[in-house]
């Protein structure tokens, strides 16, 4: 017998209500005028409320507020006042004990205050306009440092530089004090950060939603050649975030589902939680470039819903247990990508994902409900983009809210859900397409599992009607994989629950339609699938990372408008033969290399020659990205040099091979690649016969701020993934935009970069994507002969030249004995020959400079502004707001 709906537990999520307007009794203004009191709600005023409240405030009070409105600094003198005020009042320091750390804090606070004014006005403007907003859900936002970005975007870096100089500080030293925001790991998070920058710059109404990781992914240390993970304490002081302790959402886990009947006799489901965790919002302003638009990034932090401390347990002497609830709750937002090699790790990951999307959906729904519009208008005001499969549970959560809490019919709710969501796929690698065990979902999110089964049932029923003769298609496209154990295929759920699916480069978008989602193209038609090639923001990756090059370009283009219209770079080709321009271009590259060489010397004690060719591969360590191919190539170069006479060596091109990137804590093979790179460096860098001809460097703890130093210093960068495995890649774009050339495979965005800059300005090698599967089949079922040069490399490793041979046996065995899945041997000869072409090309510096200038001039397509405009037009259907500057 079902329970009566009036006996629901008190924990049931309460529907949103608008902010109450109540009269305050007593004199608060001129006689006879009462002022409405606003009790802050989670999403502030609605459009109607803000207008009615403003109209009811007496004119003298409005004038007083306007008179005392915070005025953002514009001059050096006003900036200095702000900094000194924060040093003395916020930080409780003085001229006598203000060190660089305190000066950074005060400078950050001064700029934050300035951004807040713009931020408040932007949110008010978006609310009053009452237009459609886009919500970007990403588990990663790799923001990098905020201070330099803020100074440049509001065009006040020169003011800050002069003001800090007056106060006794160098601006470069102050910028270095900031820790990178540890909210991401690789390209996925950096893409999200570039998108937020472009959304604000282009004046689109948009919010980002993520998690506030207490320790980030981890801080990488290299000890005895091994990666060691330690916590990244980046939140010690963060002036860029605003805690919103009044914006909280209680998130349910575990528990049971009851079927109930409402007063109209309609059945519905009620999920009774077994555990509740509280999500607390932290907001971060995201300033646009050369606009007052400042959007919002909302990050959720977890805490115990029951409070931090159990007095009863403490008083009974159970001290550890008295804080157990809080510690258990906080683990949800402690670390990005907790190691899921263990079952508890898998549960924490799923818990993390649901916590984040449930809090975000609750926030979005509550904001919509304040508009008092009908539910069918939800997709007219809300567009939600899923950045990869991590936020896919948002589809299920919105359906649950609509059918269980708002009591819409299934079909009405599902139409709203599918019209609201878009899904960006970032990989065709099977192991990267998330799957969750049904048993895990049953335990952690029982109601969501029921809804997933219903979604799958209705979907398969429709498919069966479309393809009555093809029974196997039901197995192939089912969201539930009938394996042992049964698994939920999140990528399939993301396709079924969205109105648009996009890949992130032309090759990748073609591949998803012919491989992982081939059957879905037959079901939905090709129009559901589209391509939006990834891109980067030139504000950070040129103007901020390489200011001298940005200034030189501006001197030829007549200003900095190219930073908002990157296609203007094509005018640089008019100056490719300008001797003075070419000379300064080369001097800027050399100065950037000197800066990196100094950093290597100061941090590692290794001297590298800045006149050598800097060959750089910095990215997440993964077998498909093939850092192992790179280091095998380096060993081959070393062996070749060792075999030469001293006279022959003098004719060779000196090189510095630079690696950087983190391996996932549970990814043993990737960690062995790091170990091998460091061990090779330990041998090569001390070999007096080789000297400056070859140096091997692994830069520890690669992050955004290090990338801003490394990328401008590259002569050559390596983007050498197995063809068909890299969805797009964006570091390739950053390197080319900074005057470096690429060695790469025909994979990801390398293909479109080649099309834009010309084949003569890129060094391509290796097999094509269409040949990969045939080669793998041959490796497994036919003959597999290793390249003889690679055999020699393996022999040297096994001799113990680079440390204990058994340490690297798995790396060798993966290629030699286990099918060489990533085609290291197949591409090795082509890779070595192409590097020889690079050496020859680099010797002709005049021709090399022409190549780099031409490449930069043709990079206009790869601005994230173009990217966002494509999303806005093809997927989100939103318009930018007019901003009165």
Image: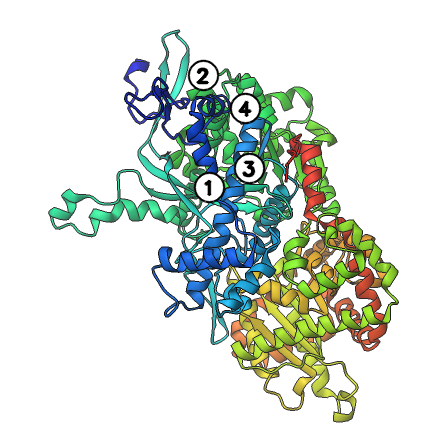
Direction from residue 120 to residue 531 in the image, left or right: right
Q: Which mark is residue 353?
A: 1
- Distance from disc 1 to disc 3, alpha carbons, whole Å, reads 29 Å
Q: Which mark is residue 457?
A: 4
Q: Is residue 72 visible?
A: yes
Answer with mark 1 or mark 3, whichever residue precedes in sequence.
3
Answer with mark 2 or mark 4, whichever residue precedes in sequence.
2
In the displayed structure, would residue 389 be above or below residue 827? above
Q: Which sits in the foreground, 625 or 856?
A: 856
- Distance from disc 4 to disc 1, alpha carbons, whole Å, reads 24 Å
Q: Picture quarter containing residue 737?
A: bottom right
Which quarter shows the C terminus? Answer: top right
Where residue 346 appears, as percent x and y from the top left, is 43, 47
Q: Which sits in the foreground, 843 or 803?
A: 843
Mark 4: few, some, or many residues within 10 Å (few <14, many ≥20)? some
Are dots 2 and 1 in contact, CB under 8 Å?
no
Disc 2 marks which residue?
407
In the displayed structure, would residue 860 be above or below residue 478? below
């Amino acid at each position: 017998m079902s329970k009566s709906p009036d006996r629901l537990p008190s924990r049931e999520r309460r529907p949103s209500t608008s902010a109450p307007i109540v009269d305050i009794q007593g004199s608060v203004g001129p006689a006879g005028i009462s002022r409405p009191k606003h009790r802050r709600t989670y999403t502030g005023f609605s459009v109607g409320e803000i207008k009615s409240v403003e109209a009811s405030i007496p004119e003298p009070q409005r004038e007083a507020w306007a008179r005392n409105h915070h005025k953002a600094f514009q001059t050096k003198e006003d900036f200095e006042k702000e900094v000194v005020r924060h040093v003395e009042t916020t930080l409780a320091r003085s001229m006598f004990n203000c060190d660089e750390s305190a000066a950074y804090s005060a400078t950050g606070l001064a700029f934050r205050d300035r951004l807040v004014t713009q931020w408040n006005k932007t949110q008010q403007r978006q609310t009053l306009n009452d237009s459609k907003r886009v919500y970007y859900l990403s588990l990663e936002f790799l923001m990098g440092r905020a201070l330099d970005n803020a100074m440049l975007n509001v065009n006040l870096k020169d003011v800050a530089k002069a003001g800090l100089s007056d106060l006794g500080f160098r601006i470069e030293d102050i910028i270095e004090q900031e820790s990178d925001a540890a909210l991401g790991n690789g390209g996925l998070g950096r893409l999200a950060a570039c998108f937020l920058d472009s959304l604000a710059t282009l004046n689109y109404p948009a919010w980002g939603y993520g998690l506030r990781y207490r320790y980030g992914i981890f801080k990488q240390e290299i000890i005895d050649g091994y990666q060691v993970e330690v916590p990244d304490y980046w939140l010690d002081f963060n002036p860029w975030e605003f805690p919103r302790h009044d914006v909280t959402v209680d998130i349910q886990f575990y528990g049971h589902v009851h079927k109930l009947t409402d007063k109209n006799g309609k059945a519905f489901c009620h999920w009774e939680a077994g555990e509740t965790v509280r999500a607390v919002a932290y907001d971060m302003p995201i300033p646009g470039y050369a606009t007052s638009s400042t959007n919002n990034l909302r990050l959720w932090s977890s805490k115990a819903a029951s409070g931090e401390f159990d007095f009863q347990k403490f008083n009974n002497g159970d001290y550890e247990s008295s804080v157990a609830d809080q510690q258990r709750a906080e683990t949800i937002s402690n670390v990005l990508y907790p190691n899921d090699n263990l079952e508890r790790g898998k549960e924490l990951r799923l818990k993390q994902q649901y916590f984040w999307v449930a809090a975000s959906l609750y926030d979005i729904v509550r904001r919509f409900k304040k508009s008092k519009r009908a539910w069918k208008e939800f997709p007219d005001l809300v567009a939600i983009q899923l950045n990869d499969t991590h936020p896919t549970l948002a589809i299920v959560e919105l359906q649950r809210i609509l059918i269980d809490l708002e009591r819409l019919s299934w079909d009405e709710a599902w139409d709203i859900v599918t019209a609201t969501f878009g899904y960006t796929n970032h990989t065709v690698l099977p192991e990267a397409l998330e799957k969750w065990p049904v048993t895990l979902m049953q335990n952690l999110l029982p109601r969501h599992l029921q809804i997933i089964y219903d979604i799958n049932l209705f979907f398969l029923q429709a498919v069966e009607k479309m393809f009555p003769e093809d029974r196997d298609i039901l197995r192939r496209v089912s969201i539930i994989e009938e394996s042992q154990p049964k698994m939920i295929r999140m990528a399939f759920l993301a396709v079924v629950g969205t109105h648009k699916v996009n890949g992130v480069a032309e090759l990748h978008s073609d591949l998803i339609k012919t491989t992982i989602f081939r059957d879905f193209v037959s079901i939905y038609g090709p129009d559901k699938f589209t391509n939006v090639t990834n891109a980067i923001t030139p504000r950070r990756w040129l103007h901020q990372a390489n200011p001298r090059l940005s200034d030189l370009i501006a001197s030829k283009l007549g200003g900095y408008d190219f930073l908002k219209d990157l296609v203007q770079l094509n005018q640089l080709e008019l100056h490719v033969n300008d001797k003075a321009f070419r000379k300064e271009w080369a001097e800027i590259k050399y100065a950037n290399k000197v800066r990196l060489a100094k950093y290597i010397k100061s941090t590692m004690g290794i001297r590298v020659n800045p006149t050598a060719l800097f060959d750089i591969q910095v990215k997440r360590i993964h077998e498909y990205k093939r850092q192992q191919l790179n280091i095998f190539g380096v060993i081959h170069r070393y062996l070749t040099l060792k075999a030469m006479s001293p006279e022959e060596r003098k004719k060779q091109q000196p090189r510095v091979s630079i690696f950087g990137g983190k391996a996932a804590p549970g990814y043993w093979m990737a960690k062995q690649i790091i170990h091998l790179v460091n061990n090779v460096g330990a041998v090569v860098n001390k070999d007096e016969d080789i000297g400056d001809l070859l140096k091997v460097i692994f830069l520890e703890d690669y992050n955004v701020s290090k990338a801003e130093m490394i990328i401008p210093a590259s002569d050559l960068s390596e983007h050498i993934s197995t063809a068909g495995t890299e969805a797009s890649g964006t570091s390739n774009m950053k390197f080319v935009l900074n005057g470096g050339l690429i060695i790469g495979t025909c994979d990801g965005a390398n293909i479109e970069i080649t099309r834009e800059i010309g084949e003569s300005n890129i060094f391509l090698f290796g097999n094509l994507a269409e040949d990969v599967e045939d080669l793998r089949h041959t490796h497994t079922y036919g003959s597999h002969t290793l390249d003889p040069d690679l055999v020699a490399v393996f022999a040297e490793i096994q001799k113990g030249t680079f440390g204990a041979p058994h340490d690297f046996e798995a790396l060798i065995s993966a290629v030699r004995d286990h099918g060489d899945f990533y085609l290291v041997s197949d591409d090795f000869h082509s890779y070595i020959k192409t590097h020889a072409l690079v050496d020859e090309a680099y010797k002709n510096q005049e021709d090399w400079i022409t190549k780099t200038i031409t490449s930069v001039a043709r990079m206009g397509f790869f601005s994230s502004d173009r990217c966002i405009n494509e999303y806005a037009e093809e997927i989100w259907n939103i318009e930018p707001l007019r901003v009165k500057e």
